[in-house]
Amino acid sequence: MDETILLQRARDGDERAFRTLYAEHTPGLFRFALRLTGGSDAESEEIVQETWVRAVRSLDRFEGRSNFRSWLNGIAARCAAEAARKSARFVPNESAVAAAPAPAHVEPAVDLERAVAALPAGFRTVLLLHDLEGYTHAEIADVLGISAGTSKSQLSRARARVRAALGGGS
């Protein structure tokens, strides 16, 4: 069924339509949240749950300017940023990440995942939204409440840190 129809039915209280949307979008939303949290299943599950709670509350305000998946990812990015601020958890600094040798048996994709997970939350979010999800800097700015220039700067710095962590210099 067309997603626009599902969205309208979900807005009208059709539980079956909502369940269909939930089933279609939750796996990708979880993978995105997993990357935002640096690999924490528990935090990712909480972000996905909070994303859906907020989405349900504001479904009637979804205007369709972006696709539904992008809208959900934007909510998830804000939830992850709020969770990171609340927890004030330790994030390794870039020198510790660059200095830590990777075991010889680790696959390059795992090294990349670790390098991305070690980024500060803001850098990681912009990198994932831009490079993985395909958002433009204007869309990222809108979703995160930052300027497009800040998005560009954070993306550049995030990429430099990932290159450094992977031994490619900066």
Image: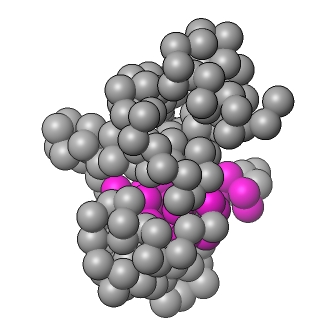
**Magenta: predominant secondary structure element?**
helix
The answer to which of 157 and 104 lies nearer the viewer is 157
| Residue 124 occupies quadrant | bottom left
Q: For the magenta stretch, what is the residue range?
A: 108-133
Q: Position of residue 123 (x, y in %)?
A: 38, 67
Q: Residue 37: x, y in percent?
A: 43, 42
Tell me: residue 58, above or below residue 42: below
For the residue pair 3 and 80, the one nearer the viewer reads as 3
The image quadrant that residue 5 belongs to is top right
The answer to whether 46 is drawn above or below residue 93 in the figure is above
Return the x and y of residue 109 as percentages of the image width and height.
Answer: 72, 57
Q: How is the image coloured?
A: one colour
Asked which quadrant contains residue 3, the reply is top right
Q: Residue furthest bottom?
A: 170
Q: Is residue 44 left or right of residue 84?
A: right
Residue 144 place in picture, x, y as percent = 33, 61
- Establish if 142 lies above or below 57: below
Residue found 38% across the figure and 59% down from its top: 143
Residue at 63% across / 67% down in the picture?
134
**25 sits left or right of 130 in the view:** right
Q: Tell me if residue 18 is in the magenta stretch.
A: no
Residue at point 59%, 45% (across, down): 68
Q: State the quadrant of the N terminus.
A: top right
Residue 81 seen in this snapshot: yes
- Among all residues in the image, which is located at the extreme right? 1
Q: Is residue 119 magenta?
A: yes
Q: Residue at x 33, y 40 (%)?
A: 79
Does residue 134 sit above or below 27 in this rendering? Answer: below
Q: Is residue 38 left or right of residue 31?
A: left
| 3 and 141: which is toward the camera | 3
